[in-house]
Amino acid sequence: MDLLTFEFFQRALIGGALIAITAPLMGLFLVLRRLAMIGDTLAHVSIAGVALGFLINVYPVVVGLAFAIAASFAIEFIRRAYRTYAELSLAIIMSGGIGLASILFTMGKGFNLDVISYLFGNIYTLNQVDIGVIGAITVVVLALVLLHKKELFLLTFDEDAAAVSGLPVKYFNIMLSILTALVISASIKTVGALLVSALLTVPAACGLTLARSFKQAVVLVVVIGEVAVLAGLWIAGVANLAPGGTIVLLLISVLIASMLFRRLRGA
């Protein structure tokens, strides 16, 4: 219980709890639309932005966010240009992000250790500004998802039908991409760019394994995300482990348990 008396751990719990709402929620939409790898793509581009932020002495998360949003527009443009090979957009943008990040790393040798903390995550270093940014992103994501829940449901399960019904598909695709970019930019300091896709996809996999409806899946992904993040933080704090890695391994453990439960339930 002594951990709860430390301000850095309190901030970690708050930031983690907020990210555990938005990341799994956005991940569910991405997984259902077969765009699960967009998390890795935008995370790598965000790291390039973080590196540039350190280089020009600007708040790194903001620059990373700008890069991720720009990448989300580029992904949507390429995805529409190559509709038959939509995954090309992710491969192209990810390659560009990694290439740019490597160049910026060589230009800023003095801040490479700081950038590494964004690669693997260090939730214990969250400050009040970080909490404010994460909180604002959480409010924006939840507000837009709740406001457009019917449209997003239709777009997720049948994009062609959504277009035929008159839904502005391009607008909602861009909106989802930008919301994903916002969540990833907020998440990279929590679990790190290399692990952020797990926070997007693993709770979604668990929810889809256990849920009997889309509404159940929405609730389950958020609950699973919250349990994994908060329990992972506690275990990491007590055992002196890396918090990002602990959260991801706990999520995978939950996924294995979910699959076993589904098999037993179906038997």
Image: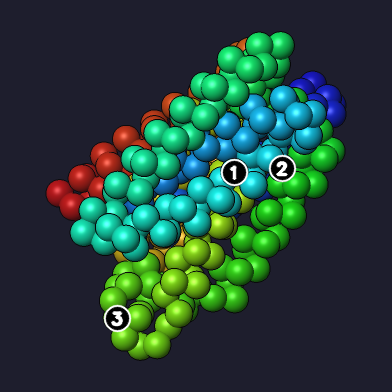
Residue 267, numbered label:
none
Tell me which corner region of the image, top left, top right, bottom left or bottom right, holds residue 227: top right
Amino acid found under the numbered disc labelled 1: Phe
At a point 77% along the width and 42% down the height, the residue shown is 131
| 247 horizontally vs 260: left or right | right
Q: In front: mark 3 or mark 2? A: 2
- Helix, strand or loop at disc 2? helix
Q: Position of residue 233 (x, y in %)?
A: 62, 28
Looking at this view, is 263 or 216 the one in front?
216
| Quarter of the figure with the N terminus | top right
Residue 161, numbered label:
3
At a point 44% along the width and 35% down the height, the residue shown is 96
| Residue with the mark numbered 1 | 67
Q: CA distance from mark 2 to mark 1?
A: 9 Å
Tell me which corner region of the image, top left, top right, bottom left or bottom right, holds residue 14: top right
Amino acid found under the numbered disc labelled 2: Val
Q: Indicate whether 20 appears above or below 53.
A: below
Looking at this view, is 138 or 165 the one in front?
165
Amino acid found under the numbered disc labelled 3: Ala
Q: Position of residue 173 (x, y in %)?
A: 45, 66
Q: Earlier in the sequence, mark 3 or mark 2?
A: 2
Q: Position of residue 180 (x, y in %)?
A: 53, 52
At a point 79% along the width and 29% down the height, the residue shown is 57
Residue 62, numbered label:
2
**Can the viewer see residue 265 in this picture?**
yes
Question: How many other residues sit within 10 Å of disc 2, few (<14), some (14-19) or many (≥20)?
Answer: some
Q: Indicate whether 198 appears above or below 173.
A: above
Q: In front: mark 3 or mark 1? A: 1
Colour mode? rainbow
Disc tally is 3
Q: Indicate whether 170 appears above or below 63.
A: below
- Helix, strand or loop at disc 3? helix
